[in-house]
Amino acid sequence: MNAAAQFTAALAACPLVAILRGLDPAEALPVGQALVDSGWKLIEVPLNSAQPLLSIQTIAAAFPDALVGAGTVLDSRQVREVRAAGGRLIVAPNFNPQVVREAVRLEMICLPGVLTATEAFAALAAGATGLKLFPAEMIPPAAVKALRAVLPAHARLLPVGGIGTANMAGYRAAGADGFGIGSALYKPGTTAADVKRSAHDFKAAWAGNLRA
């Protein structure tokens, strides 16, 4: 299955991206297992983690049905390094045309960070697979609704930053197609068991089944 088809299938199954910032390679396998067992198929290890390429390599090799890659990707060289490690997902905090084009060239999924309509349209024109709306604290549901009204219907919008189980419903009603989940899911020191519990809670919140 190519990356585009895998991304579409992953969004349909569970449109939540696990952001494992600070993951140690020794934790990669148990944390990856906890996520996959919970039905998560989109896993990102930010490049400002310890030995991120090793963690990406470990998770991608162990869980081929998951779409694994890197976050905080800032230049085209890093895109190539992630691909060499077996990653097929590129996520960035910003929109860099060179990063998007290199990811497209290598047939990878690319979700650049955007904040405005100008950035969003430019990223899509460069070939972005979808849009990371970041930081979500600055993009309330009303702003997502406004963007959704003018962007192409096929554009995938994933708010990231400050997303928890309590505020997902408002964004989803406004047109969000999924979310990136960071420290509320994982931060250094979080056990695989805790990741699994949080992963189930977030999945339930997306489905609207989480009890208060």
Image (tube, rainbow, N blue to C red):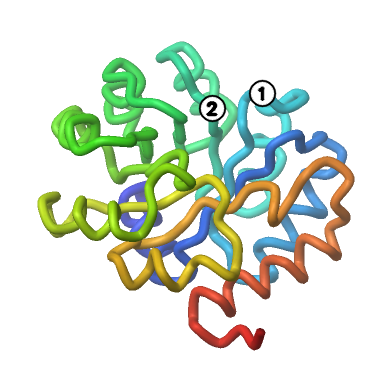
Please tell me which of labels 2 and 1 falls first in the chain.
1
Q: Position of residue 120 (x, y in %)?
A: 23, 37
- Asked if disc 2 and disc 1 are in contact, CB closer than 8 Å, the reply is yes
Q: Residue at x 39, y 34 (%)?
A: 113
Q: Residue at x 63, y 54 (%)?
A: 63
- Is 101 in front, or is 191? 191
Q: Is residue 202 above or below residue 189?
A: below
Instruction: Give the label on residue 30, or none.
Output: none
* Residue that mark 2 sits on: 72
Q: Position of residue 56 (x, y in %)?
A: 65, 36
- Is 105 in front, or is 187? 187
Residue 13 left/right relative to 27: left
Q: Amino acid at mark 1?
A: Asn
Q: Residue at x 43, y 39 (%)?
A: 134
Quarter the C terminus occupies: bottom right
Residue 123 left/right relative to 134: left
- Is 109 in front, or is 158? 158
Q: Is residue 17 above or below residue 69?
A: below
Quarter the N terminus occupies: bottom left
Q: Residue at x 47, y 56 (%)?
A: 179
| Total numbered labels | 2
Q: Secondary structure at mark 1?
A: loop
* Disc 1 crowd, CA 10 A, few/some/many (<14, 14-19, 20+): some
Q: Amino acid at mark 2?
A: Thr
Q: Quadrant of residue 7?
A: bottom left
- Is 76 in front, or is 147? 147
Q: Quadrant of residue 171?
A: bottom left
* Residue that mark 1 sits on: 48
